[in-house]
Amino acid sequence: MDSITEKKAALRKTVLSRRASLDPAVQAAGSIKIHERLQALPQWRECAFPCIYIGSKPGEVATLDLLREALDQGKQVCVPVIEPESGRLFLAEVKDPDNLVPGHFGILEPSGAELHQPGALAWDLAVVPGVAFDRQGHRIGFGKGYYDCLLSARQTPRIALAFSFQIVEEIPTSPHDIDMDLVLTENETIQPAR
């Protein structure tokens, strides 16, 4: 294992430990603040077809209410879906948030939805999860590369949602890593200098 991979693994372990101990009430309140911060952005107001991860794990910024609000605002919405057989990430459009069922890794996804290649749908904003972020817009996920693949399929604004404890001083990067345009926490909007 190279040193970048080792450093990412150590950061991932540290932040996931913090995430596991997050009080559910703090998670819920923080998620609402982050939603409000996102919805105040021109990138959100102007988008017609956001790609939104479904945050439903303990310690993760919840996004189910955000998904519902997007549909209520007349936006089309798609979500990432992992196909268990191939281990690849696809997108599925969400028409009815009440039709979501646990899929691969227990992540909610639309029941019986048609799966699309990431570049096949005209999504125009990516709302991205992650384990850790830094102020340069670098991101650590779970190490499978799903989001680097997804985000390379379309050139759209990339906005990450995170709690303040997920912001670290520095994340080591690899050439294939894709940076975030903004990182929103319950306390601030981080706009990396480019």
Image (cartoon, rainbow, N blue to C red):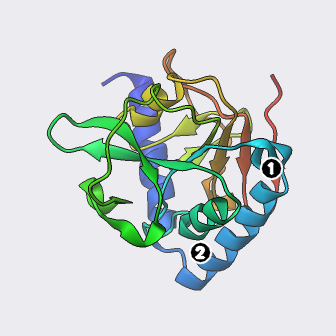
Judge left or right: residue 87 versus residue 126. left
Residue 100 vertical position relative to residue 194 in the rendered view, above or below: below
At x 19%, y 44%, the residue is 84
Q: Amino acid at mark 1?
A: Arg
Residue 25 vertical position relative to residue 31 in the rendered view, above or below: below
Q: Nearer the viewer, residue 14 or 29?
A: 29
At x 59%, y 67%, the residue is 68
Q: Disc 1 on helix, strand or loop?
A: helix
- Observer-side mark, 1 or 2, equals 1
| Residue bearing the label numbered 2 | 27
Q: Disc 2 on helix, strand or loop?
A: helix
Q: Badge 1: few (under 14), some or many (20 or more) residues near its Cα, within 10 Å?
A: few
Camera sees residue 120: yes
Upstream in the sequence, badge 1 or badge 2?
2
At x 50%, y 23%, the residue is 153
> What percent of the width, then of the height, locates residue 138?
62, 33
| Residue bearing the label numbered 1 | 45
Q: Nearer the viewer, residue 117 or 3?
A: 117
> What percent of the width, then of the height, locates residue 53?
50, 52
Q: Nearer the viewer, residue 161 or 122?
A: 122
- Give residue 10's quadrant in the image: top left
Camera sees residue 129: no
Question: Residue furthest toward the top?
Answer: 175
Q: Nearer the viewer, residue 44 or 113?
A: 113
- Give residue 47's quadrant in the image: top right
